[in-house]
Amino acid sequence: MAWGAAAVGPTISDEAIDHGQHAASAERPRLRKIIHVDMDAFYASVEQRDDPLLRGQPVAVGGSSQRGVVAAASYEARAFGVRSAMPSVTARRRCPDLVFVKPRFDVYKAVSGEIREIFAEHTDLIEPLSLDEAYLDVTENRQGLPTATMVAERIRSAIRERTGLTASAGVSYNKFLAKLACEQKKPDGLFVVTPAMGPGFVETLSVGKFHGVGPATEKRMAALGIRTGADLRACSLAFLNAHFGKAGGHYHDIARGIDERPVRPDRIRKSVGAEKTFFADLHEREAMRKAIRPLVAKVRRHCETHRLLGRTVTLKVKFADFRIITRSRSGALPFASFEAVEDAAFQLLDGVLPVEKGVRLLGVTLSAFEEDGSPALSQLALPL
């Protein structure tokens, strides 16, 4: 199957890919054909689709109260600087005409299922990252389409026809580059990074766009004079290992457009969490313990459904001044019961009490799973 690059660059055949790959390293497998699909402003777009009065309006999905938080924002709202996880009061200040809509997670999940069915028409190798985002390996595809680009176009077209929504896609020879490519033409776009383009494409980008480089790491890299992919590529493996430990090898590879991670349809979920923002700040221990109980219950229901056993409990606390702290406790073995999980969360809470400022939000997460036979879902915190 040939590589398609209708969006950018020439078409490259499998034969050419294999030849170039073997010339670089006889030990590496044949380059794959990966698509990263990301729905455009998914929650907000579903709301605009279902309510014509919202179309063209700045829309925020989330709570509109003084204590609310934006879960998702339409592109019209993003133009004013409104972003997910932003306090609603801040969002309203940036966009006075912002329309708040309560989230309908059952609807979003149903639409996500429709989209997943479209993916499955082309490949079994689907790795969902959330309800609105996934990697697909289409090195071989069920429709027998000759190029990866054609597969991506077919998927985007089917999503539009069946759901009335738009999706952006990135096509490349690994997951890292496919995700970067997807960001190039959003919304409702397609971008292709061919094997010949990969290293040069990476060099032009800010390291803050790279998978595995968060704000803290980006700041550390900047202090070392590393601001672009070209800067990162100029660093030796020894230098990167010395400054970033075991992550150094990852940074060394991605600076060269190398990412060996396969698409994992059975990817084990890393964490299950629930959190809640309170209408009034909490100050007393018993009020906080009472708030933690339904969070643990929410986590419990999901973990029991998917037969997940975890070794690490994390408590998240957001204070009235929006400062966030987390505290974790891990065991050598999974927690034997969710009563033990609740007790661990209470002990973590006791470790941060008394508090100088009120508590605006509490969250409980279970992670470090020993999975018992169920495929993973998304890593989104479960909303209450």
Image (tube, rainbow, N blue to C red):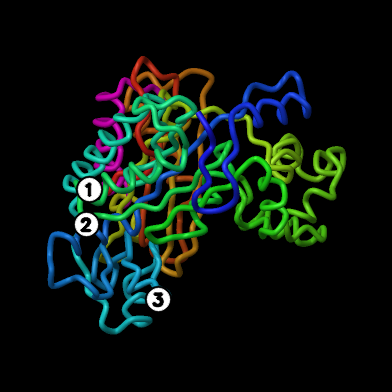
Q: CA distance from mark 2 to mark 1?
A: 7 Å
Do tag 2 and tag 3 residues touch (Cβ < 8 Å)?
A: no
Do tag 2 and tag 1 residues touch (Cβ < 8 Å)?
A: yes
Q: CA distance from mark 1 to mark 3?
A: 23 Å
Question: Which comes before the other along the chain, label 2 or label 1?
Answer: 2
Q: For residue 115, what is the image quadrant?
A: top left
Q: CA distance from mark 2 to mark 3?
A: 19 Å
Identity of the residue drawn at 33% across and 81% down? 95
* Disc 2 residue type (three-letter): Val
Q: For residue 54, what is the image quadrant?
A: bottom left
* Disc 3 residue type (three-letter): Ala
Question: Which comes before the other along the chain, label 2 or label 3?
Answer: 2
Identity of the residue drawn at 30% across and 37% down? 296
Q: Nearer the viewer, residue 136 or 308?
A: 136
Q: Which mark is residue 79?
A: 3
Q: Which mark is residue 36?
A: none
Q: On the image, numbered disc 2 is attached to which residue?
A: 46
- Check residue 310 for magenta coloring: yes
> What kind of secondary structure does the magenta stretch mostly adopt?
helix
Question: Which range of residues does the magenta coloring cover?
Answer: 288-311
Q: Secondary structure at mark 3?
A: loop
Residue 347, given in percent of the width and then of the height, sits at 44, 39
Q: On the image, numbered disc 1 is attached to which residue?
A: 108
Q: Residues within 10 Å of mark 3 (few under 14, many from 20)?
A: few
In the image: residue 127, left or right of residue 104: right
* Disc 1 residue type (three-letter): Tyr
